Image: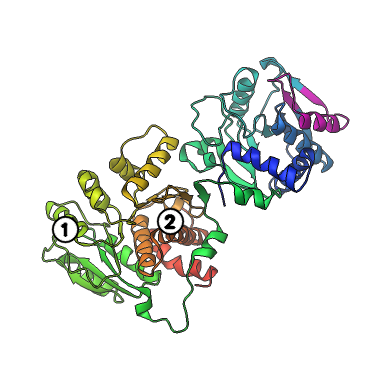
């Protein structure tokens, strides 16, 4: 699912109007009807609905929505925020359609803003996706009043004052509880700093022209079921364990063998053919007892990884969970990156070792997969001031080092060496707990061993990691969810895709 810029979204609307063909006002009617269809499933007629409409096409959507809600017996009050004396043509058409049905009031000054209470249900249709400067004047005053109301706010297409694809430091942005957008997600919805504005967001189909979508060129994509169905590899009748690779996982240190266990168990549960884990000597009995399906090799050192085993027989390897950053381990990491030239998966302390010696970044095998959380990425690539800048740095880093980077978060961003970024669509807040990153390392390593490309392994791995977490949360809630739960729900996630 493509993520388009504000300019591209406008062009897609125009393409649909010209090539379907459909009139602009009828496309607006279609979008408004889809909003109402969603709205009535969420909210009853018990609360009065107040709509705040600008004078552009987003306001035109709001007026059409008001008419349709009135027809469905909702109590509706409509307020026009008169930030411009020049309304759009479609706004004017919908204004004339609504005027005989519902009283319409204009807001010219702050004194015209109605008293808003938490018992109201507010719909924000002041500004749409074309906004490119901070809200000011009466529009800013209305936005501030909405935010102070403590009422539920539903934004039409995008919260007013928020830009689609660039950073804004404006203090006047609607803080919506729900945002209903049309057909395709917006970049701003996927960045952590905008959650306070976007709230819970949903998409509704409005029939934008498929050829127009196909022709749009973008580096940003939202991972959906259709993409996953294209990427997954089904097993054949005559496949055998040799068909699915032999992975090596280098993990664990004294007191952190749990991380190694989680990684190994997740790798096995994702379908690797053969798996060897390489651990300090203190972890031998632990791994042999806890994970009988995996083979175990031990380092000469009792407590840490100090050497690297012979690597020739392994299809791929993952390194980092529970590893520690002792001097001997750092030397072993140096040796690994000099000797092994196939893509590797690096997480946790493996990333911390890279961050301490940036020269090691130049030794990374092309196509390697790095899986940092935001602070780990900051140590690797430098500090940034906002999420948009961090996204730019992420793309630059992946290109410069020819690696795939999984920047973990609510919508994990997967940056590829070619400059593309895929935002994940699965997962939940319950996964914000220790060990879930180790599980992801095991999943991605397993897929890489099964001959997925690095990009495919990262995209598919992050998706199924989140999907298993979603199934786990359904049965266990957020607070009680653990990394082990995610592993135990991987089969349910794979079964959904007949894997």
Residue lying at 18% horizontally and 51% vertically, measured from the top left:
325
With respect to residue 409, does 305 lie above or below?
A: below
Q: Residue 480 carries which label?
A: 2
Kindly give the residue lying farthest to the right in the view shown: 100
**In the image, residue 102 lies in the stretch drawn in magenta:** yes
Residue lying at 59% horizontally and 26% vertically, measured from the top left:
148
Residue 445 position in % (x across, y down):
34, 64
Residue 42 position in % (x across, y down):
68, 47
Q: Residue 211 carries which label?
A: none
Foreground mark, 2 or 1, reads 1
**In the image, residue 136 lies in the stretch drawn in magenta:** no
- Tell which circle, 2 or 1, labels the residue nearer the N-terminal end: 1
Would residue 369 be seen by someone viewing this image from the given angle? yes
Segment colored magenta: 79-105
Q: What element carries label 2?
A: loop
Judge the density around disc 2: few (<14), some (14-19), many (≥20) Cα neighbours within 10 Å. Answer: few
- Apparent side of residue 12 relative to residue 231 in the rendered image (left or right): right
Residue lying at 56% horizontally and 40% vertically, measured from the top left:
199
Would residue 36 be seen by someone viewing this image from the given angle? no
Q: What element carries label 1?
A: helix
Circle 1 residue: 335
Way the structure is coloured: rainbow
User: In which quadrant of the rendered view does residue 68 lie?
Assistant: top right
Q: How far apart are marks 2 and 1 (CA)?
A: 40 Å
């Amino acid at each position: 699912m493509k993520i388009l810029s504000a300019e591209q979204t406008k062009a897609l609307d125009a393409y649909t109007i010209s090539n379907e063909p459909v009139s602009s006002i009828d496309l607006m009617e279609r979008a408004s009807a889809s909003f109402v269809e969603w709205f009535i499933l969420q909210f009853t007629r018990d609360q009065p609905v107040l709509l705040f409409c600008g004078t552009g096409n987003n306001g035109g959507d709001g007026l059409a929505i008001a008419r349709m809600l009135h027809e469905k017996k909702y109590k509706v009050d409509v307020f026009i925020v008169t930030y411009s004396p020049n309304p759009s043509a479609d706004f004017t058409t919908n204004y004339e359609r609504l005027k005989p049905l519902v009283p319409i009031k204009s807001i010219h000054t702050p004194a015209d803003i109605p008293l808003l209470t938490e018992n109201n249900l507010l719909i924000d249709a002041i500004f749409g996706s074309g906004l490119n400067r901070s809200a000011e004047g009466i529009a800013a005053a209305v936005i501030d009043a909405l935010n102070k109301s403590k009422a539920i706010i539903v934004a039409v297409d995008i919260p007013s004052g928020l830009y689609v694809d660039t950073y804004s430091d404006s203090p006047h942005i609607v803080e919506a509880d729900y945002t209903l957008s049309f057909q395709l997600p917006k970049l701003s919805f996927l960045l952590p700093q905008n959650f306070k504005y976007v709230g819970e967001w949903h998409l509704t189909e409005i029939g934008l022209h498929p050829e127009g979508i196909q022709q749009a060129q973008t580096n940003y994509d939202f991972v959906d079921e259709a993409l996953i169905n294209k990427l997954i590899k089904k097993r054949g009748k005559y496949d055998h364990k040799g068909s699915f690779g032999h992975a090596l996982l280098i993990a664990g240190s004294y007191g952190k063998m749990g991380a190694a266990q989680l990684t190994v168990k997740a790798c096995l549960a994702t379908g690797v053919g053969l798996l060897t884990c390489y651990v300090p000597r203190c972890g031998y009995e632990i791994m042999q007892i806890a994970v009988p399906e995996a083979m175990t090799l031990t380092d000469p050192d009792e407590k840490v990884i100090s050497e690297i085993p012979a690597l020739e027989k392994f299809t791929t390897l993952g390194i980092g969970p529970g590893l520690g950053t002792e001097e001997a381990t750092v030397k072993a990491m140096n040796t690994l990156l000099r000797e092994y030239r196939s893509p590797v998966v690096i997480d946790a302390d493996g990333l911390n070792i890279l961050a301490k010696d940036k020269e090691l970044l130049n030794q990374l095998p092309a196509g390697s997969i790095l899986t940092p959380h935001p602070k780990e990425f900051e140590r690797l690539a430098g500090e940034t001031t906002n999420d948009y800048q961090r996204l730019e740095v992420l793309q630059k880093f992946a290109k410069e080092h020819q690696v795939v980077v999984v920047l973990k978060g609510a919508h994990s961003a997967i940056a590829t060496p070619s400059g593309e970024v895929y935002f994940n669509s699965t997962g939940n807040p319950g996964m914000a707990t220790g060990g879930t990153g180790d599980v992801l390392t095991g999943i991605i390593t397993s897929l890489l061993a099964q001959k997925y490309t690095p990009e495919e392994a990262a995209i598919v791995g992050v998706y199924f990691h989140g999907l298993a977490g979603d199934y786990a949360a359904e049965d266990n809630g957020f607070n009680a969810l653990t990394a082990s739960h995610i592993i135990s729900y991987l089969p349910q996630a794979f079964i959904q895709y007949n894997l």
